Image (cartoon, rainbow, N blue to C red):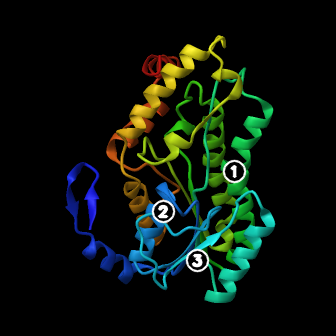
Amino acid sequence: MIRNEYNPGSQVNLSGFYYFCRMKTNVKTVLVTGGSSGIGAATARLLCNAGMTVYAASRSGKAPEGYSLNGNMIPLVMDVNDAEAIAAVVERIVRERGSLDAVVCNAGNGIAGPIEETSIEEIEAQYSTTFYGVVKTVQACLPVFRRQGHGRVVTVSSVAALAPLPYQGYYSCVKAGILQLTKALAIETKGFGVQCCVVMPGDVKTGFTKARRVAQNTQREDSPYYKGCVKALAAMAKDERDGMRPEVIGKAILRQLQRKKMKPEVTPTFVYSLLVFLIRRLPQRLVLKVIGWMYS
């Protein structure tokens, strides 16, 4: 049982859903990065409950939040910034399970601040985990997928990839990079039996809001961007606190792993799917004006 994201006071019985997934899936072993909390933890729990063996990787190596360990859930320490550590984990999985069927690239961080005042070091920290972490993880898994003749790559981008968020411009850049990387990867690896899907969440209620760092230079009240940044981040934090539960994203990922052919791109919930449609169709001047109004 999980809480209904649209009606937090009620619960949804997913036993039939899990049974259907067990009957349908060919995906047995999955590596999930950022698997100890938030979207990663919710995804790991749902995949495990659907009968898959899940290696939930994180820097802490802790079990996913709210989950009692069993033989199908294997938490492990892995830093997506460390290519050698990722390679060792992939080798371990293949040695223990005989194959690796899918990887869910979810690990990431957030740095907020105006483009002018965010230091190169802070920008590099944003790219290192959230973008290059995906690259390193995918590069470690692809040789296994090619040898097997099958494999699935699911990446977690964001609606922010299409909506340039003020004071989170670098975050939007990173998520846009993941979006295009995944689609290019789908073209390059199709001949090897590899399928790729990029998931585009909107606002999600996780610990990401509290963990988001603010550029050092913008924390000074004499910064010309200080008031605008504070106001915009307060609006974003409210949207995230009121956002969907991470299980909504986990269910979207699970559905794709069960499909015979994954969709190239998925935006969970009708509201955010409509938002993505409008961002892509409306005049960009209007889109920028609306976004500026939302966070000013």
- From the image, which quarter does the N terminus lie in? bottom left
Front in this rendered view, residue 270 or 111: 111
Q: Earlier in the sequence, mark 2 or mark 1?
A: 2
At label 1, the amino acid type is Thr
Query: What residue sits 54% from the left and 16% below the top?
Result: 228
Measuring from the top left, give residue 118's x and y in whole percent: 72, 27
Query: Element at badge 2?
Result: helix
- How many numbered marks have been drawn onto this rendered protein structure? 3
What residue is disc 2 on? 41
At label 3, the amino acid type is Asp
Above/below status of 261 relative to 286:
below
Query: What residue sits 61% from the left and 87% below the top?
Result: 97
Q: Classify 10 Å Cα crowding around label 1: few (below 14), some (14-19), many (20 and above).
A: many
Residue 14 visible? The answer is: yes
The numbered mark at residue 129 is 1
Q: Is residue 135 left or right of residue 275?
A: right
What residue is disc 3 on? 101
Above/below status of 148 relative to 123:
below
Quadrant in which residue 224 is drawn? top right
Marks 2 and 3, how far apart at CA:
19 Å
Query: Element at badge 1?
Result: helix
Q: Is residue 4 left or right of residue 165?
A: left
